[in-house]
């Protein structure tokens, strides 16, 4: 109160009592969840277990430089930087500088995606004001009895500040994609997958296309991403199906064929194994 008491005499007398500050162009986020990753193994493995979703994910790097692959385009994320992953962006993490790290993830839902389109593929250098805001959000989230309204308002404000930063810092926030051995290998694999006309290509065919032995390809992939290439192909296939469910009016049979499955039954089994519900239930829930 003392600070406000001291400030009161300095508040100016308005020249117009009916003309104030402009309204804030801000969208309220909802269904906020915050978590952290402290090791490379957890970061890479848990990502493939949870990334098929309709939520936004704000990644905040507090320690250990790494790369984020978004739909086959790689971006370097340094300490004190953040990157917003949009719904249904196929993403993975690679080339981390250390086995230990400290990354914070703030995930949420936002109906008006176009309101924050400026943040797509933007690396953001966080300032002290933004870090203070993030700290406040995290402290409230982990409190014994979190104040949901406070968390929603502060997270919405953080998103608004990041959007303004992206709009007025063009050069800083539009980095060139990074090129590394792991990134190039992943891009080659994805090109083979995309060019395959008869479903999902088998691993021997992928290995031949990128001029590696099958054994060497499997070893390198697990070394870079901490999951098997077979798992990656399964997640890739289901991710494509999820995207088609959300963004098209295709039937489930058509989606199964387009995603590389030979039958609706095969598609349903694979989908339920990864998504924990069948395609019909998932689609009905996503349309609510």
Image: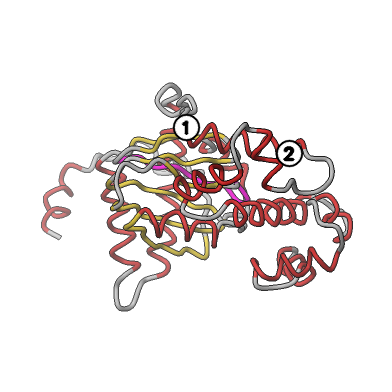
What residue does disc 2 label?
A: 194
Residue in the foreground of this view, choosing between 170 and 85: 85
Q: Which mark is residue 55?
A: none
Q: Which residues are magenta?
A: 80-89
What residue does disc 1 label?
A: 181
- Residue 111: % across, % down: 62, 54
- Residue 204: % across, % down: 68, 44
Query: Quadrant of the image for the C terminus?
Result: bottom right
Q: Residues within 10 Å of mark 1 (few under 14, many from 20)?
A: few
Residue in the foreground of this view, choosing between 180 and 277: 180
Identify the coloring: secondary structure
Image side of residue 113 versus residue 137, left or right = right
Disc 2 versus disc 1: distance between alpha carbons?
Answer: 20 Å
Query: Quadrant of the image for the N terminus?
Result: bottom left
Furthest residue in direction top, as rendered = 171
In reply to whether residue 161 is colored magenta, the answer given is no
- Residue 210: % across, % down: 63, 33
Upstream in the sequence, badge 2 or badge 1?
Answer: 1
Residue in the foreground of this view, choosing between 71 and 154: 71
User: What residue do we see at 80% from left, 48% from top?
Assistant: 199
Image side of residue 279 versus residue 221, left or right = right
Q: Secondary structure at mark 1?
A: helix
Comparing marks 2 and 1, which lies closer to the viewer? 1
User: What residue do we see at 75% from left, 70% from top?
Assistant: 269
């Amino acid at each position: 109160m003392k600070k406000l008491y001291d400030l009161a005499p300095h508040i100016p007398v308005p020249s117009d009592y009916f003309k104030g500050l402009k309204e804030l162009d801000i969208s309220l986020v909802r269904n906020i969840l915050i978590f952290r990753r402290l090791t490379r193994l957890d970061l890479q493995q848990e990502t493939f277990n949870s990334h098929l979703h309709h939520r936004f994910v704000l990644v905040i790097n507090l320690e250990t430089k790494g790369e984020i692959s978004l739909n086959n385009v790689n971006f370097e994320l340094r300490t004190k930087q953040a990157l917003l992953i949009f719904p249904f962006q196929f993403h993975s993490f690679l080339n981390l500088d250390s086995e230990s790290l400290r990354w914070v993830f703030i995930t949420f839902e936002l109906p008006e995606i176009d309101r924050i389109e400026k943040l797509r593929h933007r690396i953001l250098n966080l300032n002290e004001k933004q870090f203070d805001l993030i700290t406040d959000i995290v402290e409230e989230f982990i409190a014994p009895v979190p104040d949901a309204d406070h968390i929603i308002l502060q997270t919405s404000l953080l998103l608004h500040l990041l959007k303004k930063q992206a709009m007025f810092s063009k050069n800083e926030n539009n980095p060139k994609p990074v090129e590394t051995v792991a990134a190039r290998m992943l891009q080659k694999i994805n090109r083979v997958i995309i060019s395959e006309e008869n479903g999902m290509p088998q691993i021997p065919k992928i290995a031949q296309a990128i001029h590696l032995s099958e054994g060497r390809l499997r070893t390198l992939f697990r070394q870079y991403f901490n999951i098997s290439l077979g798992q990656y192909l399964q997640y890739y296939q289901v991710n494509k199906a999820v995207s088609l469910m959300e963004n098209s009016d295709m039937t489930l049979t058509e989606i199964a064929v387009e995603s590389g499955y030979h039958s609706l039954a095969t598609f349903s089994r694979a989908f339920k194994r990864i998504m924990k519900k069948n395609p019909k239930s998932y689609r009905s829930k996503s349309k609510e």
